[in-house]
């Protein structure tokens, strides 16, 4: 699913953020990237998701060389990747309408969009809250909504940035259990977090991102 080799990335001021990154993620694998704040985790997810163009090195996602994708091809790939950004903020709409809006933008007709939205909400345990305004959700349910949005388009790959951030230990375990459930459905997950990793998360492999390099933990 993902093959990264000799990946380097520096700021405009020449500060190295990522240095000689090598990473392989198999289809259906659940990988955690563990590292402190400002380690480059968000940047690496953006590179994997074709949101940020690579400067040097190779990134293959689902057999596609991200560096060589034109604008239309990059957009097509991004639509096949579910992304949960750090500090996710939903639209000022109901839970259901947040999903419906995304699915309609992606070209689904009304009936298909409604079916996919309900399935995603069922998966994350938010079906009863579908008529609730998203801004009224508590933090852990906002994360669940973000996961539903990432899932609703049946993506090839899920990239999740700090899904445990700001949650208490019980809520982190709840989200960890949900990620394990999603993984059980043969989804490919890459989760970036400062830690700690909930015991319920059950990741296949954990890597550390420190000083610009990725190493097995």
Image (tube, grey):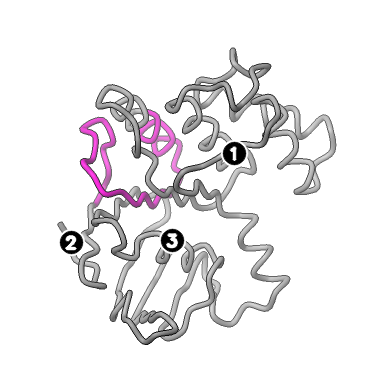
Specify which label sits upstream in the sequence, 3 or 1: 3
Pick the quarter of the image with the C terminus: bottom left
As helix, strand or loop, the secondary structure at mark 2 comes to strand
What residue would you read off at disc 1?
149
Query: Which residue occupies 50% across, 67% down?
Result: 61
Q: Please state if 165 lies on the left or on the right of 35 as rendered.
A: right
The numbered mark at residue 45 is 3
* Residue 196 lies in the magenta-colored region: yes
What residue would you read off at disc 2?
216
Q: How far is the residue under mark 2 from the one under mark 1? A: 30 Å
Pick the quarter of the image with the N terminus: bottom left
Of all residues shown, which one is farthest toward the front? 13
The residue stretch that appears in magenta:
178-205
* Residue 114 lies in the magenta-colored region: no
Query: Which residue occupies 50% across, 52% down?
Result: 157
Label 2 neighbourhood size at 10 Å, few (<14), some (14-19), many (20+)?
A: few
Q: How far is the residue under mark 2 from the one under mark 3? A: 17 Å
Q: Foreground residue, 98 or 2?
A: 98
């Amino acid at each position: 699913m993902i093959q990264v080799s000799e990946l380097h990335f520096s700021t405009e001021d020449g500060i190295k953020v990522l240095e000689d990154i090598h990473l392989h993620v198999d289809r259906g694998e659940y990988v955690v990237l563990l590292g402190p704040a400002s380690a480059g985790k968000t940047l690496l997810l953006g590179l994997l998701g074709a949101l940020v163009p690579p400067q040097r090195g190779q990134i293959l996602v689902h057999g596609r060389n991200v560096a060589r994708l034109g604008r239309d091809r990059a957009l097509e790939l991004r639509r096949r990747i579910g992304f949960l950004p750090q500090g996710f903020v939903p639209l000022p709409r109901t839970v259901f309408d947040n999903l419906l809006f995304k699915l309609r933008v992606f070209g689904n007709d009304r009936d298909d969009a409604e079916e996919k939205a309900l399935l995603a909400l069922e998966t994350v345990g938010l079906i009863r809250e579908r008529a609730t305004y998203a801004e009224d959700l508590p933090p852990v349910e906002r994360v669940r909504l973000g996961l539903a949005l990432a899932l609703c388009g049946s993506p090839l790959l899920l990239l999740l940035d700090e899904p445990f951030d700001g949650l208490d230990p019980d809520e982190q375990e709840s989200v960890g259990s949900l990620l394990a459930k999603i993984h059980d459905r043969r989804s490919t997950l890459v989760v970036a977090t400062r830690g700690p990793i909930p015991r319920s998360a059950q990741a296949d492999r954990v890597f550390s991102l420190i000083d610009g390099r990725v190493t097995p933990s």
